[in-house]
Amino acid sequence: MKQVKILFIDDEEIVLKSSLRILKNSDYDIHTAHSGEEGLVLAGDSKFDIVVTDLKMPGIGGMEVLKTLRETQPDVTVIIFTGYATVETAREALKMGAFDYIPKPFTPDELRDVLHNAVQAREESSGAVMLDLMAIVSHELKSPISVVHTTADTLYRGYFGKLDDTQQKTVETILRNCQYLEDIIRNYIDLSKMEIDDMESFKEDIRLYEDVVEPVIEIPEHKTNMKNMVIVPDIQVKPGVYGDPNLLKIVVTNLISNAIKYGKADTEIKTGIYEMSDAYVFYVHNEGVGISEQDVKKRLFGKFARLKQKGTEGVKGSGLGLYICKKIVEKHSGKIWVESEEGAWVKFSFSLPKKK
C-alpha cells in the first residue's frame, strides 16, 4: 500500500512539533512548513495526499491555502487547524471543500482520528473510481469476447466439420479462457453496480421463480453447457418476495455458473425453492470436487478469495462471485450458506424473508 504523504502548515513551532511527536510511530510520510507561502511552495514541488493547515497565519492564511489547492490540486485532502475563536471560519472552509477541522488545542486522539478518517475516505473514493473504470473497460470487452466464445463454441460442436483430437483440445482451451474472461467481466460489472454498502432495502414486489430463477435457468449457456450437465429444477413453491430482480439474478447466475464450472461432467445440477417458517430458500446442488471445511469457514465468501481445490487446477476465476452474492443476499435481509462433502458434492443455498 502506498505510504500516505502529509504536509503540516502552521506558524507555531509547538504545533508542528506536537503533531510530529503524536504521529512519530505512524506509517505516514510527514513534512512541515512554517507559513502558507512555504507550504504552497512545497505542495507545488511535491505531491501530498493530505495537507493540514492553520487558518490564522501571517501572510497567506489557511483559507487562501485551501482555495489555491482546490484550484491546482483538487485531489489533495485539506484539513484545517483552528482556534476555538475561529470555528465559524472553519465551517466556511468546510463549505469550500476542506475535509474536516481540528480545534486547538487538540488531543493526540483527535489528531489521529481525523487523519485516519481522511485516509479512509481517500481509499474509498479511489476504490469507487477504480470500480467505475473497471466497469467501463469490462463493458467494452464484453462484446468482442462473446463473439470469440460463440465462434469457438460453433467450431467445438462440429458445425464446420469434425475436429481432430489436437484441434478439439485447442478449442477447449479457447472456450475455457473465454469463460474465465466473461466471468471476470460479469463480476466487475456487477461489482461496479453494487458496492452496496449504501443501498437501501429493496421493496419491489417480485416473483422469485418467474422473475429471477427461471430466466437464469433458461440461459442457453446454462441449458447446453460444455459439460453436458442437466439442470433439474425442484420448485416446491413459487413465492412472492421483496427484492431487486436484477441483483438476485446475479446471485442465481453465479451459483449455477459455479455449479457448471466446478461440477462433474454428465451429472445433474439440482436446483429448487422450498418454504421455511419465516423464509423461502433457493438452492443449487452439484456433484464434483466439493469444498473443504476449512475453506467453508474461513475463505469462501471473501473478496478476491480463490480456493485451491484438487481437480480444479485448470479452472480460473476472479474471486469476486461469491463475495458479490453474499453482499446482495445480505442487503435483501437474507442469508447465504454452503454445505459440502469434499470430493463428492456441494450445495449452495440462500434465503429471503417472507413478506410481512
Image (cartoon, rainbow, N blue to C red):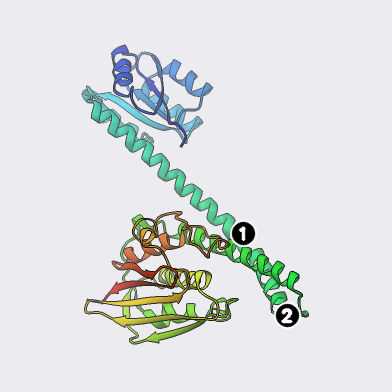
Residue 95 appears in the rendering: no
Residue drawn 53% across and 60% down?
317
- Please give the label number shown on residue 255: none
Q: Give me the disc on residue 140.
A: 1
Residue at image point 40% right, 18% down: 32
Q: CA distance from mark 2 to mark 1?
A: 29 Å
Q: Determine whether 5 is above or below 125 in the image.
A: above
The residue located at (54%, 77%) in the rendering is 222
| Dot 2 alpha-carbon crowd within 10 angstroms: few under 14, some 14 to 19, many 20 or more | few
| 136 sits to left or right of 63 | right
Q: Position of residue 101 (x, y in %)?
A: 30, 31
Question: Where does residue 269 sit, x and y in percent of width and height?
Answer: 47, 79
Residue 280 position (above or below residue 106): below
Label 2 or label 1, whichever lies nearer to me, is 2
Residue 31 image-quadrant placement: top left
Which residue is tagged 2?
158
Question: Which amino acid, by three-letter code, is at mark 1?
Answer: Glu
Q: Nearer the viewer, residue 62 or 278?
A: 278
Sequence-wise, the earlier of marks 2 and 1 is 1
**Left or right: 334 with respect to 165?**
left
